[in-house]
Image (cartoon, rainbow, N blue to C red):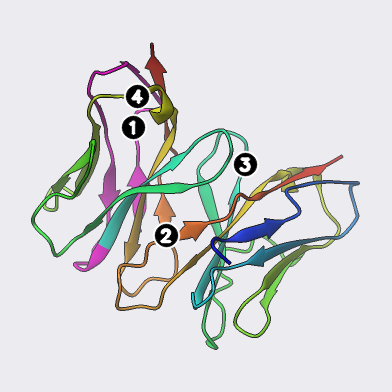
Amino acid sequence: AQTVTQSQPEMSVQEAETVTLSCTYDTSESDYYLFWYKQPPSRQMILVIRQEAYKQQNATENRFSVNFQKAAKSFSLKISDSQLGDAAMYFCAYIPNTGNQFYFGTGTSLTVIP
Amino acid sequence: GAGVSQSPSNKVTEKGKDVELRCDPISGHTALYWYRQSLGQGLEFLIYFQGNSAPDKSGLPSDRFSAERTGGSVSTLTIQRTQQEDSAVYLCASSLVRGRTPEAFFGQGTRLTVV
């Protein structure tokens, strides 16, 4: 079974501080892709960051970075210098290279405290 | 278009009526996905279209649900004889062909309320 688990339903962070959101996944595939999506109250799912499983280097996008541990099947998201606009639901997602669907976790609701 | 467009944005329907939800993907994207997001829940896969291949309908929850994609572009998700448990946000996404990182671009969704 291919599953994605986000064990933190809710997280909070002080503005300008750093927060890490956890994600683990279960797969027997060796070639796949991982993503973090952000969903603000507007409902629009926005891609935050992507990681190809064949790349050992962790992806970074400005204040967002990941810690990709392939052997442990872990894919955490670190948000540095948190801003009020980062408040949203964050979803971890996985798709195998030959797959027909993205598998999503249940999401982590992030609150940014001014 | 510039992004994935879904219509209507909101739909309220009476139990037992049929509804059609529309998705207009990004031009050139051959892959199209439908997902359902119930209140406070994650995303549930419904159906996947890739080019001219037969769609993967494995996520459709019942035979009341169907979808088509015309001309490899616009897709319509139809729910017949709607039930209250069908109330949810229906999200559509599209992506480029296999061989590239299959990043999914999402529309803003259709919020369906069955009363």
- Measured as percent of width and height from the top left, residue A104 is found at 42, 49
Position in image of residue B57 (x %, y %): 59, 72
Label whose residue precedes the other's in the sequence (4 or 2): 4
Which range is magenta? A3-32
Where disc 2 sits, the SS reads loop
Residue A5 vertical position relative to residue B93 in the rendered view, above or below: above
Compared across the picture, whether A114 is left or right of B73 comes to left
Q: Tag on residue B97?
A: none
Residue designated by label 4: A83
Quadrant where the image shows the C terminus of chain A:
top left
Measured as percent of width and height from the top left, residue B5 is found at 63, 60
The residue type indicated by label 3 comes to: Ser
Same chain for the residues under marks 3 and 2 in the image: no
Contact, CB < 8 Å: mark 2 with mark 1? no
Q: Tell me which residue sits at (87%, 60%) in the image.
A: B18
- Residue found 35% across the figure and 37% down from its top: A6
Other-residue count near label 3 (Cα within 10 Å), few / some / many at <14 / 14–19 / ≥20: some
**Picture quadrant where residue B66 is located:** bottom right
Label of residue B38 in the image: 3
Identify which residue is drawn at 56% across, 79% down: B55
Disc 2 marks which residue?
A102
